[in-house]
């Protein structure tokens, strides 16, 4: 009995899988035979009314599909601009104003001697309804070197994905019912594995559908911009010797050299002034103290010298007086 139930559950799983594959194949066949009016006639046993209904339904679906075609639009433009940063800012502002955004960007600065120029690429995602207006505006930021646009019809892909999703979702519901009613461990594991596979396929198709719908809703515009490449740097003419130059040129060069030297002196003095103010104050204080001390010593020496001279004068005067007195005494004794 258990083996019979297990066989029954496994058979149902296989039937559900086969039904899903057949449904997906039928959807693809319907999509490929949409415009064939004889397809319905052979299936309805030659019933004209059924054939007319099938033909009318097919034409209606075809007209609806044409009316709602899903297009992925792209544009590429290469322009030469005067200033890369300015052009980039203007286009980014314009894209934001039209509901778009920058999805990728890169730039590179080239150098040649002391000259530079910038090149880069900016990828914009623009709402499909604003694609043409933005693309035309992008071509006016500079001188166009190359431009092209393209459109890819992905309607059939979306229809196919939608049909496969519907079929897989139906399989998932049936497998869930089998999973809930399964009593045997082996049957449960088998149903669970198949259910996991179906769920993974559903998620993969939903992600693919979302990616396609995003590319349909937002067109891609790639703008490559480059600044003009500067000419090769001109060489500086060789300086002539002093004896080959004119008198006026030599005089002007001399004046210019003197002015440069004077300017250097002034700048150097201005640069050193704060340091002189900080370091000069202690030095000036020491110098003043030393001068005062030297002056005091000089005054003391002058006073001592004056006193010594005065004392010498008094001694000399005393000696002179004593000599005169002795001379007078000698004269008196001679008489």
Image (tube, grey):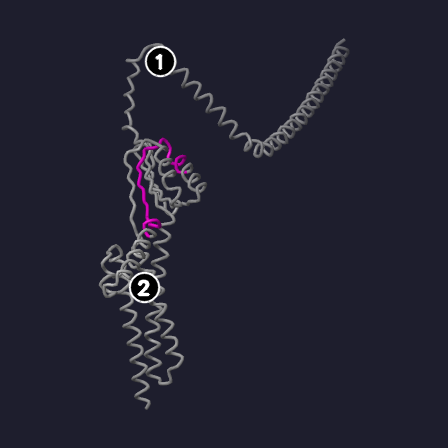
Q: Residue furthest front?
A: 48
Image vertical order of residue 230 relative to residue 244, above or below: below
Q: Residue at x 39, y 77 (%)?
A: 177
Residue 33 position in % (x across, y down): 24, 58
Q: Quadrant of the C terminus?
A: top right
Image vertical order of residue 6 relative to residue 265, above or below: below
Quarter of the image for residue 276 reads top right
Q: Quadrant of the N terminus?
A: bottom left
Nearest to the observer: residue 276 or residue 190: 190
Label 1 sits on residue: 250
Q: Secondary structure at mark 2?
A: helix
Quarter of the image for residue 206 reads bottom left
Label 2 sits on residue: 164
Residue 127 in the figure: left or right of residue 275 = left
Image vertical order of residue 72 relative to residue 334, above or below: below
Q: Secondary structure at mark 1?
A: helix
Nearest to the observer: residue 297 or residue 291: 291
Residue 93 position in % (x across, y down): 44, 39
Image vertical order of residue 81 relative to residue 199, above or below: above
Of discs 2 and 1, which sits in the foreground? 2
Nearest to the observer: residue 42 or residue 179: 42
Q: Earlier along the polypeptide chain: callout 2 or callout 1?
A: 2
Residue 278 position in % (x across, y down): 58, 34
Which range of residues does the magenta coloring cover?
Answer: 65-88
Q: Is residue 150 magenta?
A: no
Q: Residue at x 77, y 11 (%)?
A: 332
């Amino acid at each position: 009995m258990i083996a019979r139930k297990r066989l029954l559950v496994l058979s149902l799983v296989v039937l559900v899988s086969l039904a899903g594959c057949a449904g997906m194949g039928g959807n693809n066949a319907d999509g490929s035979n949409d415009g064939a009016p004889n397809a319905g006639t052979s299936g309805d046993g030659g019933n004209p009314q059924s054939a007319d209904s099938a033909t009318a339904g097919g034409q209606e679906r075809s007209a609806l599909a044409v009316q709602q075609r899903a297009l992925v639009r792209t544009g590429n433009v290469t322009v030469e601009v005067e200033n890369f940063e300015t052009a980039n800012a203007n286009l980014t502002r314009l894209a934001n104003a039209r509901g778009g955004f920058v999805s990728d960007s890169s730039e590179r600065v080239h150098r040649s001697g002391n000259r530079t120029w910038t090149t880069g690429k900016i990828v914009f995602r623009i709402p499909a309804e604003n694609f043409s207006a933005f693309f035309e505006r992008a071509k006016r930021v500079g001188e166009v070197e190359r431009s092209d646009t393209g459109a890819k019809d992905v309607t059939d892909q979306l229809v196919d994905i939608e049909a496969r999703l519907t079929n897989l979702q139906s399989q998932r519901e049936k497998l869930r019912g089998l999973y809930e009613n399964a009593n045997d461990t082996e049957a449960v594991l088998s149903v669970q594995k198949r259910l996991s596979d179906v769920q993974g396929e559903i998620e993969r198709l939903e992600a693919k559908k979302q990616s396609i719908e995003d590319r349909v809703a937002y067109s891609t515009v790639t703008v490559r911009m480059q600044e003009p490449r500067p000419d090769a740097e001109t060489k500086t003419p060789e300086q002539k010797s002093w004896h080959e130059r004119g008198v006026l040129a030599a005089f002007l060069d001399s004046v210019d050299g003197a002015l440069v030297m004077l300017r250097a002196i002034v700048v150097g003095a201005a640069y050193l002034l704060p340091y002189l103010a900080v370091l000069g104050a202690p030095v000036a204080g020491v110098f003043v103290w030393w001068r005062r001390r030297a002056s005091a010593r000089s005054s003391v020496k002058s006073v001592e010298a004056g006193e010594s001279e005065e004392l010498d004068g008094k001694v000399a005067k005393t000696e002179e007086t004593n000599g005169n007195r002795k001379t007078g005494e000698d004269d008196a004794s001679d008489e």
